[in-house]
Image: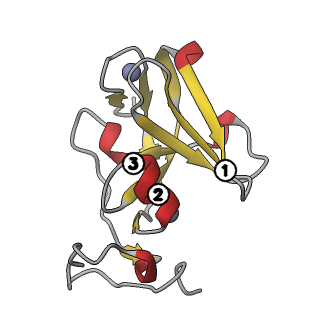
Amino acid sequence: MSKSYHGSCLCGTVRFSVDGFSEQAANCYCSMCRKFHGAAFGTLVAVEGLVWLSGKDALKEYVAPNGTTRTFCCQCGSSLGFRVKGEPLEQIELAISAFDVDIPVTIDAQIYTDHKANWCELPSNIPAFSAGREE
Ligand SMILES: [Zn+2]
Ligand SMILES: [Zn+2]
């Protein structure tokens, strides 16, 4: 049996579990992530075995001008996820901060650092990219 990891929004309406994670996760400093997460950066992680335990009907979506979809709780506004243009809900990358437990993920990049706020200091121990990850 695989281990599962639970997460939820601030008000607890939306609850989910996953049983695996992508090996890559980056802190993104782009203006859309900053505004959506209300923070210096946003961090999203691709997951495996996602199950919505409650509140799936409370998920609200915002489609940004570039076609990406941001998902949040309609009750409390918690930022919950992101998906690329045209992808179904099953392909959502989850906001890493929504997890209620420690998760086996290491942040291995800082991306879109050209867009960071002046008051934000980048940690020097994580590779930084001015735009997306370099291939
Ligand atoms: Zn909520
Ligand atoms: Zn971003």
Q: CA distance from mark 2 to mark 1?
A: 11 Å
Earlier in the chain: of badge 3 and badge 1, it is 3
Q: In the displayed structure, would residue 79 be above or below residue 65?
A: above
Q: Dot 2, crowdedness within 10 Å: few (<14), some or many (≥20)?
A: many
Residue type (three-letter) at the residue carrying disc 1? Ala
User: Would residue 56 appear left or right of 33 to someone viewing this image?
Assistant: right
In the rendered image, which quarter contains the N terminus? top left
Locate residue 41, reporting x and y percent.
35, 62
Residue type (three-letter) at the residue carrying disc 3? His
The answer to whether the residues at label 2 and label 3 have Cβ atoms under 8 Å apart is: yes
Q: Dot 3, crowdedness within 10 Å: few (<14), some or many (≥20)?
A: many
Residue type (three-letter) at the residue carrying disc 2? Cys
Q: In the displayed structure, would residue 52 be above or below residue 86?
A: above
- 63 or 56: nearer the eye? 63
- 76 or 124: nearer the eye? 76
Q: Secondary structure at mark 3?
A: helix
Mark sitting on residue 33: 2
Q: Secondary structure at mark 1?
A: loop
Q: Dot 1, crowdedness within 10 Å: few (<14), some or many (≥20)?
A: few
Q: CA distance from mark 2 to mark 3?
A: 6 Å
Mark sitting on residue 37: 3
Earlier in the chain: of badge 2 and badge 1, it is 2
Q: Secondary structure at mark 2?
A: helix
Mark sitting on residue 64: 1
Q: CA distance from mark 3 to mark 1?
A: 14 Å
